[in-house]
Image (cartoon, rainbow, N blue to C red):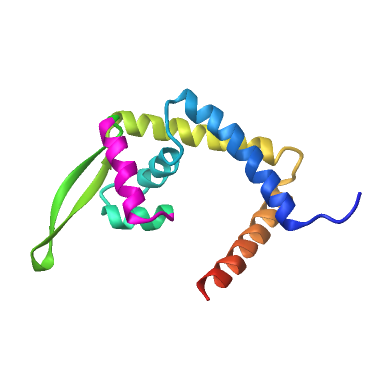
Amino acid sequence: MGRKFLHVLLLKTYSNHKKRSRQYFQQLQLTEGQPKVLTILSGMEGCQQKELAQACGVEPATMTSLLKNMEHSGLIYKERMSLPGGKWAYSIFLTERGRGLSGEVMDMVEQLEETAFRDFTEGEKETFLKLFAKVAENLDKVNEQ
């Protein structure tokens, strides 16, 4: 069968995952970055926009654009808050519609994970996730240098 190259397997997996996810998210009328924001925000409602950008791994300007569209679509709302030193920032919250879609996104993610790990034992799945996390950590370290 030949040697398996990590980059080929990663790209193939990413491509298949993205294709399946995109089809589902389009049915929910969500744009590309919105499912990640909904998922992460559901676990850290009330966070500042800057914190959300960091958690999502996007630039603050990208987050500003994403949140503007999500607010326009009725998925989130912002509350202005005062910070020490006379500064201010926005706290971000999900609307009821946003919470509902966040739940649907999580359901889809779980279904996709079940498909991906079909025919795996729980032990194999746990080992795979530990090893994959280690690969991600090693690549993160290289990017930090």
Q: Residue at x 10, y 68 (%)?
A: 85
Quadrant in the rendering for residue 39: top left
- 115 vs 14: above or below: above
Residue 83: percent from the left, percent from the top? 14, 62
The prevailing secondary structure element of the residues shown in magenta is helix
**Picture quarter containing residue 70?**
top left
Q: Residue at x 43, y 41 (%)?
A: 33
| Above or below: residue 128 compared with residue 19 | below
Q: Is residue 139 above or below residue 104?
A: below
Residue lying at 48% horizontally and 27% vertically, measured from the top left: 26
- Residue drawn at 17 percent across, 45 percent down: 79
In front: 46, or 125? 46
Quadrant housing residue 7? bottom right
Q: Position of residue 110 (x, y in %)?
A: 56, 37
Q: Is residue 24 left or right of residue 123?
A: left
Number of marks drawn:
0
Q: Residue furthest bottom?
A: 145
Residue 5 can be seen, yes or no: yes
Q: Where is residue 71 drawn, in percent x and y?
A: 26, 36
* Magenta stretch bounds: 57-72
